[in-house]
Amino acid sequence: MKLLRNCGSSLAFALALLLIAQSSAFVFAQPVDNGPARQSTVLTLDLSDIPPFGTEQARTSFAPGNQPFTNLTWPKTSLDELTDNADAIVTGTVIEKISYWNDEHTSIYTSVIISVDDGVKGATSGERFTVILEGGEADGMGLLVSDQPEFAVGEQTFVFLKRLSPEQIPQDDVLSISTGEQFEVYGGFRGKYTIEEDKIGTLGVAQFKERVNLVLEGINLTEQDLELPMESITSKYTFSGYRWPGSWPTVSYWINENTGDTTGEGAAVQAAAATWNAAAARFSFSYAGPTSTTNVQTYNGVNEVIWGTDVTSGALAVTTTWFYQGTYEIVENDMEFNDNYNWSTSGQYDIQTVALHEFGHFLNLSDLSSGSDKVMYYAYTGTKRSLHSDDIAGIRYIYGSSITAPQVSNASGASSVTQTAAKLNGNLTSTGGENPTVHIYWGASDGGTTPTSWANDVNLGTKAAGAFYTDISGLTANTPYYYRTYAANSAGGSWAESTASFTTLPIIYSLTMAVSGSGNVTPLVGTHHYAAGTAVSISATPASDWEFDTWTGNVGTVANVNSDNTTITMNGDYTITANFSQATLNIAISGSGNVTPELGSHTYPVGTSVNITAAPASGWEFDSWTGDISTIANASSANTTILMNGDYSIRANFSQADLTIAVNGSGSVTPSVGTHTYPVGASANVTAIPAINWAFVNWTGDISTVADVNSANTTITMNDDYTITANFNRIAGALTMAVSGSGNVTPELGDHTYPVGTSVNITAAPASGWEFDSWTGDTSTIANASSANTTILMNGDYSITANFSQADLTIAVSGSGSVTPSVGTHTYPVGASANVTAIPAVNWAFV
C-alpha cells in the first residue's frame, strides 16, 4: 500500500479520474457566483479510453535511464484481465466501514466489511470479506488517496478482490473488526462497481455476471463484450469538495531544488504559482523559500515541493492532500516530481507545465478526461504554461472571483479635431482584475448610459489598463458631437462618469484682398481666413484724385460689386480686387474731322475741367458732342469744356449735307427717292420725270437753294440737310371694259383712255335669253351701277364688268311624289317655256 498521490501528469492523472468516477467524496459542482457549495453530486466519467491501473508489473517504477512515459502506457484493463487475476469476485452489500491511523501515525486506512450476496469466484454467499483501502478520515484528519475506490455503508457492489499478504496489511488495533482474510480491490477503481436498480452503469447485473462466468469457463468473448461498463460525463472543471479555509486564503509553499537534471526549477515552479495568482480569484500562492525536505509522505503542516524517486506509480508528479475531518478544510498539500524522469525548463518534460497542473490540485481541482487544451487535463501533452478559461472558472468557483467592475474615464476628451474627424480618448483606470471589453459610444446627440440611444458603437475589444482611443471620420464641420466610454468584464460594466463633447472645426476659407489703382481696402491687402458662411464686410477707399470703380475677381457672393462698402459671403476661397481709377476721357469722332484732345483715352485727376475742340474736315460740319455729356458745358459747341467727375466717353459728330428726295403723284426722280449725301456747299442736279397720263407740277420742301422750283430739271445748293418733293398731277385715265355672261358693252371690250374729269357713257346689251344684272369693279364714279345705260366719271384708271344672267327654275315637293324636272334648280333662257310634271306616289294624289 502507499500514500495518496492525488495526481500525476501520467498515471496519477488517470487514477484521480478513476477516483472521481467511483467515489462519493469527489464531486462535480456547477459554477456559481458565491464560491463552492457544500452540496455535491457523484460524478461519473467515461474512462474507457484511459488505461486503468493493472497488474503489479504495471505499478513498477522506472529507474533512471529507462524510457519514460509520455502518457499513460499501462495495458488497458478489460473484463477478462480482471476476472483472471482476481482472487475473489463477489456481489455484496457494504455493512460496515471504519477509518484509522496506522501504528506509525503516518497514514490513514479504511477497512470495509462486505457481506457476500453471490460468490462468483472464490467466495460463497453469506461470507464476509474485509477490504482495506488507503485513505479516509480519522481523529479529525482526512487523507485523499488517488487510486482507491470509495464505499458507502448499505451500498450494493460488484467487486474484484485481490488477497493481501500479511506484510501488506497495516498494523492497528482497529483490525480486530476484520473478518477472515484481508483483500484489496484489484484494478483500483476498475475493479469496483456500484449496483443501482440492478444495473452496473447501463448494463444489467445479470448480463454482466453472465459475461464474467463465460470468461471463467474459458469462452472467448468479443472485444465489445470485454469492455467494462462505465457512464460518461464531461465538464468544464471538477471540484472534489475540499478547499483551503478563509475568504481569501494565501497558501505558502517551500521548494527543494534538488533535481540534477536542470537549473532554474524553482523559478519554473514559482512561475506556475504566479499563473494561478493571475487568475483573479480570491486565492493566492506565496513562495516562502527553500526547504531541504526530501520526504513528503507524512503530514507536517508544511506545503512542500520536492523531487524524489519513491513515486512507484510511474506518474510524472504526485500531489498529496491532507484536510480536517468534517470541515473539509485543506491543511497541507505536497508536490513530488518523479525524478526518475529527465526534467527541463524548456524540453520534453517542462517543469512549469507540470507544476501548473499540480498547483491546480493544491486548489482541489480534479483531473479532466476531456479538453486536452486545459491545464487540468489528466495527461501530459506538451508545454502548457497558461490557463484555459475553464481552469480559471474552476478556481473562481471554489474560492470566488476577485474581479470587480472596471473603471473608465473620458475626461481627457477628444483630440485632433478637424472639420470631419476626431480622436476620441479614454482611459481604463482600473481593469477590476480582469481585462475588460471596452466600447466608445458616440454620436450627434448624447445617449447617456443607454447603449441603444447612441448612434455609433466602437468595440475596441479587450484592453489592459491605460489610455485608449479610436479615430472617427465622416463628421460634419462646425457640429457638436458627444461620446462616452464603457467597459465590462465578468464582474459587470461601468460607464465613464460623464459624457464628453466636442465641436468639429468650421470649414475655413481664405479671402485674398488686392487693389488695382490707388486706394485702400478693408480687410487689408493680403489673405484673411473666415469660417464658411461668414458675411465679411469689405470696403474700398480711393486715394486723392482717384475713385472706386468696382470689385472684380471671385465676386459671385459679393452683395454689390459696384459699391465701395458691401459684403462677401465666404462659401469658398476667394480673391477679389478693389479697382480704383482716375477720371478717363475717351474721345471718338463720327464723320470726318479732328478733335482736341486727340482720339483715344486720356486720364485726368477727378474734378479737372478739360477743354475739348471739334474741327470738321473740308466738306463736313460739326453737329454736336454725344455720349457722357452731362458735364459738357455746351454739347452743341465745337469748342467747349468737360468737367472730369468720372470716366466719360464722348464723341464729336461731323456730317455732310443730306438731300432727301420724295415724290407726290406718279413719276420718278433723279437722284432716286431717298437720302443722298453731298459735301457741304455742293450743287446737286435734280430731275422730275412724270408717269404716263401725269405731268410735273413743281418742287416743294427745303427749296431755298433750288435754282428753279417749277423746272423739272434744276439744281440745289447743299449748304445743309434738305428734304424736297417732286409733285406730279394726273392728266388722263384708262377705262378697261369686261363682260360676265353673254352680251355686249359700249365702249367695247378692252382699254380706253379719257382725259381726267371726262364723263363717259357706258351701255350693256344682253344676248338673246339673257338679262343684264349690274356693273361691278371700280364702280365708285358710275352714276347707277344697276342701270344698263349709265355714265362713269374718269378721275383715274378704272376696270368695270357688265354682268349678264339667264332665268333659274327651282322645283320642290310637298307630300309624297316626284316631279319632272327633278327637285332642284334648273336654268332656262329668259322667256323660255319649261314643261313641269307632278307624279303622285301610291295612295297619294296631286293637289
Image (spheres, rainbow, N blue to C red):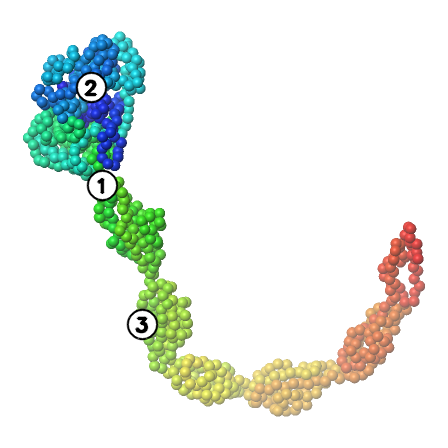
Q: Are marks 2 and 1 in contact (CB under 8 Å)?
A: no
Of callouts 2 and 3, the N-terminal one:
2
**Which tag is nearer the camera, tag 3 or tag 1?**
1
Query: How far apart are labels 2 and 3 at the CA level?
Result: 102 Å
Amino acid type at image mark 3: Leu
**Which tag is nearer the camera, tag 2 or tag 3?**
2
Residue at image mark 2: 188
Position above or below: 161 against 260: above
**Which tag is nearer the camera, tag 2 or tag 1?**
1
Which image quarter: residue 729?
bottom right
Name the residue: 21% across, 10% down: 127
Position above or below: 686 against 39: below
Name the residue: 86% across, 62% down: 810
Q: Is 127 left, or right, of 537 in this rendering?
A: left
Query: How far apart are labels 3 and 1 at the CA level?
Result: 65 Å
Q: Is 700 left, or right, of 581 in this rendering?
A: right
Residue 342, image x, y percentages: 13, 27
Query: How far apart are labels 2 and 1 at the CA level?
Result: 41 Å
Instruction: Identify the secondary structure beneath mark 3.
Output: loop
Q: Quadrant of the C terminus?
A: bottom right
Q: Quadrant of the N terminus?
A: top left
Residue 364, image x, y percentages: 19, 30
- Is any part of residue 739 visible from this angle? yes
Instruction: Identify the secondary structure beneath mark 1.
Output: loop
Q: Which mark is residue 403?
A: 1
Of callouts 3 and 1, the N-terminal one:
1
Position above or below: 137 against 162: below
Between 205 and 348, the residue placed more toward the observer is 205
Name the residue: 62% across, 88% down: 702
Amino acid type at image mark 1: Ile
